[in-house]
Amino acid sequence: MKIKRFTGGNLKSNGYVIYVKPKGDCYIIDPGYNHRVFADFVRENGLKAKGIILTHLHHDHTGASDAAADVLGCPVYMHEADAAVYRGRVDLTLTDGDVLELEGEELKILNTPGHTEGSICVMSERSRVCFTGDTVFDTDLGRTDLEGGSEEKMEASIRDVVDKWDNDIHIYPGHDDGCTMKQVRKYNTEFIAITEGRNR
């Protein structure tokens, strides 16, 4: 899988264009700011946008979604729990375990509530990558003190979902740089506190 990251806005949010081959299909993940950079990249590389996947409903990840969808003529995907309260455009809702196809790649949708009720991670087992939104970062976890957040659900998501990922899975989060799960297990103190049974 080929991955192009764009970072923008005051919160330096990451958005991604993912594709397998030149002039093939692509998905856009979390176009938070400036829809033009995403649309221009898609067009300049002769890609066809299959859809926009939103990892959760916060504006720093969804702000350019409507405009990007309009320009590229593609649907917007969001987990049903966040879609129920989100005020922007959602064309198709997702649930845990759904699979989206991309040129032979299977993108598995994993519901990881905690940051929001409908937070998701998008996993490609074949490429050994996972787009984690604001669930897990290189050295910390997503906030749980915003509307829809839950510390208890975040802890359950980390224990029951994220901690099951192999060390070679490379995470691409909604902020900051990516890293492997091996690095998360070594340097992410909040993750370590949960998985080793200590309170955050």
Image (spheres, grey):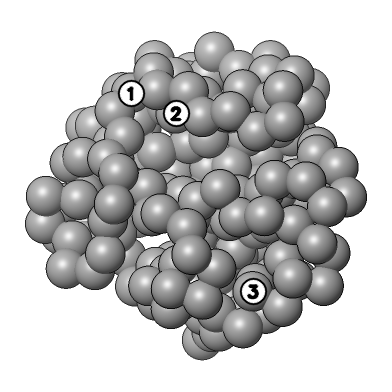
Q: Quadrant of residue 19?
A: top right
Say whether disc 1 or disc 3 marks the residue closer to the N-terminus: 3
Direction from residue 81 to residue 104 in the image, left or right: right
Report crowding for label 3: few under 14, some 14 to 19, many 20 or more residues within 10 A (C-alpha): many
Residue 136: give its label: none
Say whether disc 2 or disc 1 marks the residue closer to the N-terminus: 1
Report crowding for label 2: few under 14, some 14 to 19, many 20 or more residues within 10 A (C-alpha): many
Q: Which residue is mark 3?
A: 39
Discs 2, 1 touching: Cβ within 8 Å: yes
Q: Quadrant of residue 13?
A: bottom right
Q: Quadrant of residue 159?
A: top left
Say which of marks 1 and 3 sits in front: 3
The structure residue drawn at horizontal position 68% and vertical position 19%, both measured from the top left corner, is 125
Residue 69 lies, in percent from the top left, at: 45, 67
Q: Amino acid at mark 1?
A: Asp
Say which of marks 2 and 3 sits in front: 3
The structure residue drawn at horizontal position 84% and vertical position 64%, both measured from the top left corner, is 45
Residue 161 lies, in percent from the top left, at: 44, 19
> In 3D space, how far apart are the residues under numbered discs 1 and 3 (Cα atoms)?
28 Å
Relative to 101, is 174 above or below? below
Q: Which residue is mark 1?
A: 96
> In 3D space, how far apart are the residues under numbered discs 2 and 3 (Cα atoms)?
24 Å
Residue 55 lies, in percent from the top left, at: 42, 49
Residue 109: give its label: 2
Q: Secondary structure at mark 3?
A: helix
Q: Amino acid at mark 2?
A: Ile
Q: Amino acid at mark 3?
A: Ala
The structure residue drawn at horizontal position 48% and vertical position 23%, both measured from the top left corner, is 99
Residue 68 lies, in percent from the top left, at: 50, 73
Q: If the image is split into quadrants, where does the N terminus sit?
A: top right
